[in-house]
Image (spheres, grey):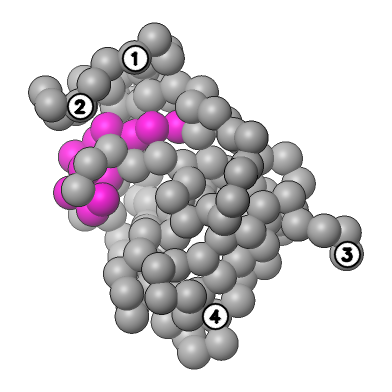
Amino acid sequence: MSAPTATGRCVCGAVSYDLQGDLRGILVCHCVECRRYHGTSGAYTSVTREGLTLRDPEGLLRWFPGPQSETGGERGFCSRCGSSLLWREPGSATYSVAAGGLEGATGLRIAQHIWDDHRADWEPVDDVPRIPRGTA
C-alpha cells in the first residue's frame, strides 16, 4: 500500500485513521445538527469508503444517528474523548471526515458552505459559494 494521502485522529489518540486517494475540498455545514454537535459549523472533506483505514484497537468509535438528518446520516465519534471524526449516509460511496481531526498541512481549502440558511448570525460570511438547505 502506498503512503496515505492524509492521517488524522481524535483528541485522546485512541481512534486514528489513514486516508488514501483524492480528498474533496472542505464543505462547511451550517445545519442545526452540526452546530449543536460541534458548537459551531462542521467542516468536512470526504474519502471513498475503501480509502479509509480506521485504527480503533479499543473499539471506541461509536455511531450516533442524526435525529434530524434528512438522509439518515450518522456521526462517528470517539466515545472516550468525544471527538467528532466521521459522517456517513446509508448507501453513500464516501465517508465525510471532520477536517479538524486531520494531521498537519493538507492543502485542502473550503469549497463551499452548505445548509447556509441555518448559519448562526455570529458566524462570519466570506466569499466562498453558499448553498441553501437541501440543495447540495
Q: Residues within 10 Å of mark 1 (few under 14, many from 20)?
A: few
Query: As displayed, is residue 128 above or below residue 52?
Result: above
Alpha carbons under labels 1 and 3: distance apart? 39 Å
Which of the numbered marks, if any, corresponds to residue 35?
A: none
Label 4 sits on a secondary structure element that is loop
Quick check: can you spot residue 14?
Answer: yes
For disc 1, the marked residue is: 126
For disc 4, the marked residue is: 56
Instruction: Say which of marks 2 and 3 sits in front.
Output: 2
Alpha carbons under labels 3 and 4: distance apart? 19 Å
- Cβ–Cβ below 8 Å for labels 2 and 3? no
Quarter placement of the N terminus:
bottom right
Q: Amino acid at mark 3?
A: Met
Please tell me which residue lies in front, 91 or 85: 85
Alpha carbons under labels 4 and 1: distance apart? 37 Å
Q: Residue furthest bottom?
A: 58
Pick whichever of labels 4 and 1 is earlier in the sequence: 4
Q: Residues within 10 Å of mark 3 (few under 14, many from 20)?
A: few
In the rendered structure, does residue 36 fall within the stretch colored magenta? Answer: yes
Alpha carbons under labels 2 and 3: distance apart? 41 Å
In the image, the segment drawn in magenta is 27-38
For disc 3, the marked residue is: 1
Instruction: Say which of marks 2 and 4 sits in front.
Output: 2
For disc 2, the marked residue is: 123
Q: Is residue 6 left or right of residue 68?
A: right
Q: Residue visible at 50% across and 33% down?
A: 26
Q: Amino acid at mark 4?
A: Asp
Q: Residues within 10 Å of mark 4 (few under 14, many from 20)?
A: some
Pick whichever of labels 2 and 4 is earlier in the sequence: 4
Quarter placement of the C terminus:
top left
Pick whichever of labels 1 and 3 is earlier in the sequence: 3
Label 2 sits on a secondary structure element that is loop
